[in-house]
Image (tube, rainbow, N blue to C red):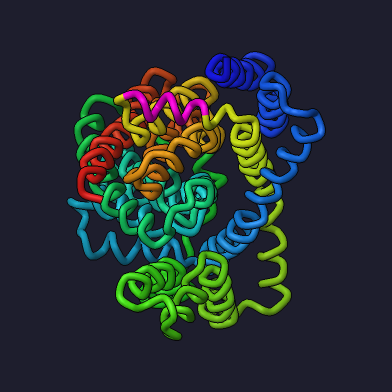
Amino acid sequence: MPLVITLLSIVFLLVLITRFKLNPFIALLLAAGFVGIASGMPLVKVVDSIKDGMGGTLGFIAIVLALGTMLGKMMAESGGAERIARTLINRFGENNVHWAMMFVAFIVGIPVFFQVGFVLLIPLVFTIARQTGVSLVKIGIPLVAGLSIVHGIVPPHPAAMAAVDLFQADVGKTILLSIIVALPSAIIAGPIYGSWISKRVKASISPELASQLAEPKSERDLPSFGITVFTVLLPVLLMLSATVADVTLPKEHTIRQWADFIGSPITSLLIAVIVSFWTLGFNRGFTKDDILKFTNDCLAPTATILLVIGAGGAFNKVLLNSGVGDYIAELATASAISPIFLGWLIAALIRVATGSATVSMMTAAGIVGPIALQIPGTSPELLVLATGSGSLILSHVNDSGFWLIKEYFNMSVQDTLKTWTVMETILSVVAIILIMGLSYIV
């Protein structure tokens, strides 16, 4: 019966989102309530579990999301993203511009959402395509591949950080492993696949859209490459330093305690945001009022994703408290299926059905989380990557990202399926192959 309840809750969730177009936040709360009531939990405990799950998840992720969004906003307003792009393109040369775009997206994508990174960099893609005559698809696919894989599996992105919290994974190890997985995946799905498909699919710049895009800043208005990269990667470096200290120093050592404090996601992001106020703010001529406006304006769009992640935490808590999670864990323990592959598979199925990477990752984490706690030797870091990579697969017409790519590249639905959808699927499949390989080592 517990397995039936879980399957029905997933079907219930998918029907609410896809058939009735219900907001994913409400749908996840209803699915959590359904699991609690159907499994016989006292009604008061169902409500308490939802509150505890929501509060426990958002208590951590709300701070991380707010700080990460502010860091991305400072980079966007200062022209830092454009500086990184121009520098790498100049270094790689015109013939290898598609490789440069992938690395640009990989770096720029660390502190910003996929949609934000895309809107930031797409004017540059259009400009390069005009100036060089290189196919828009050949340049554009590596760009979205780099942004997408970083958004899906690399902390401190919100869904990945929420999964780190749910699986009780080490954030520094997760970052290291995510880079090992993300780079080869982006290379195969981006420059390699992009070069191949660009000979078969043509895209053009929509005149209406191109006319609305902001003109690139002049060279003198851009911050330096070194200071921009330092600011963007500062939280990652601080988190990695904490992991190094944990491996090399005893727990009581003062340096390790300070490294753990400074390298925690909240502290490291706070430090980076404060540094960005100077390096990408005051140093670029912005006033205190400008920076206040930037940090206020950027928070409003995060409300939806925060609520969805919080509701995913509520769903996870109800699964745990109802005993359904323990039952699924016992079944998985007795079976031969790898929890890592199971996490990827569940996330992939929900992604295809709902179109939401965040919903699929949070739901999969809620189901697989109890299994990870009961099976010795299962790497929580790889579970984060597995659910994240599963949440990228087969983006199609029920995903807002699909339509974003279609409109900006002025392609037909069929051509968008051949380019964007296949690229996302390659990212997901290559990533899980690499993750399964790492599971024999880590």
Question: Residue 413 location, x and y as percent?
Answer: 44, 20
Magenta stretch, residue numbers? 327-335
Residue 350 vertical placement versus 57 (above, below)? above
Question: Residue 390 location, x and y as percent?
Answer: 40, 33
Q: Residue 339 is drawn in which quadrant?
A: top left
Closer to the camera, 353 or 293?
353
Question: Residue 60 location, x and y as percent?
Answer: 62, 57
Number of numbered tags placed on the structure image: 0
Q: Is residue 246 left or right of residue 308?
A: left
Q: Is residue 419 left or right of residue 27?
A: left
Residue 184 vertical placement versus 292 (above, below)? above
Q: At x 50% / y 37%, what residue is drawn?
A: 370
Q: Residue 340 is drawn in which quadrant?
A: top left
Visible in this render: residue 410? Answer: yes
Is 328 one of the magenta-colored residues?
A: yes
Residue 237 vertical placement versus 349 (above, below)? below
